[in-house]
Amino acid sequence: MSPILIVPPAAEPVTLAEAKLYLRTASPDEDDLILALIRAARHLVEAAGNRLLVSQTWRLLCDAWPPGGMLRLPLGPVMAVAAARVRATQGPAMVVDEGALRLEPGSDPPLLRLAGPLPAPQWPHAGIEIDLVAGYGAPADVPEPLRQAMLMLVARWFENRGDAASQGDARLPADVLALLAPFRRARL
């Protein structure tokens, strides 16, 4: 299952003004750098927590429908299934009825229940396309610990430009990991 970003987040969970206040800087000279650090911090927090923060649309490509009737989604939290299509050998893709795919409420990782008749893909690879809207919603809906983790990373990178790489330690700082811990999925 290959996820492809279709519509990126419209805004970051942390604004430039919030980051500058946290950094205690008012100068506009480094606004571009701070914005880049905010984006990098969001990507790192999303990867470390295996959760998307702000609403964004992703397309999942699958080869076949799972035999058990449940599809484990690699992205979360999932707000909605925007569309689903099955590729035909020729002509346009067949649209899957919206009632045939249902998000399993409260599941973590997100599960998609195959609840109706589904056409079989006629392509051997990536014959199924499922578009998902994932994330917590608007920037204001992102849990505060995740926003705080972003701010801490931005501050660390802003204050230690180039220094962290020379230390040879690629792990996340303990205080950031502590903020991410309640949101991480346990792996068995």
Image: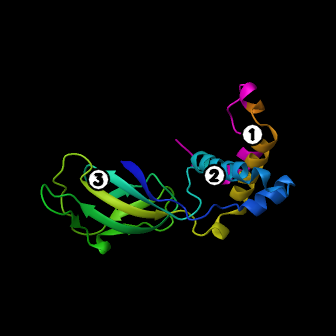
Q: Nearer the viewer, residue 182 or 137?
A: 137
Nearest to viewer (mark 1 / mark 2): 2
Regarding mark 2 in the picture, which secondary structure is present there? helix
Disc 3 secondary structure class: loop
Image position of 97 (left or right of 31): left
**Circles 1, 2 touching at the beta carbon (< 8 Å):** no
For the image shown, how many numbered marks are present on the structure? 3
Choose between 179 and 86: the one closer to the eye.
86
**Above-or-below relation of 99 to 53:** below
**Which amino acid is tagged 3?**
Pro
Can you tell which mark lies on residue 39? 2
Please name which of the two marks, 1 or 3, marks the residue nearer to the observer. Answer: 1
Which residues, given as a range, are shown in magenta? Answer: 165-188
Q: Is residue 80 magenta?
A: no
Query: Can you give x and y, in whole percent of width and height, for residue 56 in the image?
Result: 50, 62
Q: Residues within 10 Å of mark 1 (few under 14, many from 20)?
A: few
Q: Are marks 1 and 3 in contact (CB under 8 Å)?
A: no
Q: Which class describes the residues within 10 Å of circle 2: few (<14), some (14-19), or many (20+)? A: some
Q: Amino acid at mark 2?
A: Arg
In the picture, measured across the screen, residue 26 lies left or right of residue 135, that is right
Q: Secondary structure at mark 1?
A: loop
Cα–Cα span, label 1 and label 3: 39 Å
Q: Residue at x 21, y 62 (%)?
A: 93
Q: Which residue is mark 1?
A: 173
Residue with the mark numbered 3:
66
Q: Nearer the viewer, residue 28 or 103?
A: 28
Q: Is residue 176 magenta?
A: yes
**Marks 1 and 3, the one that precedes in the sequence:** 3
**Residue displayed at 19% across by 55% down:** 121
- Mark 3: few/some/many CA within 10 Å (<14, 14-19, 20+): few
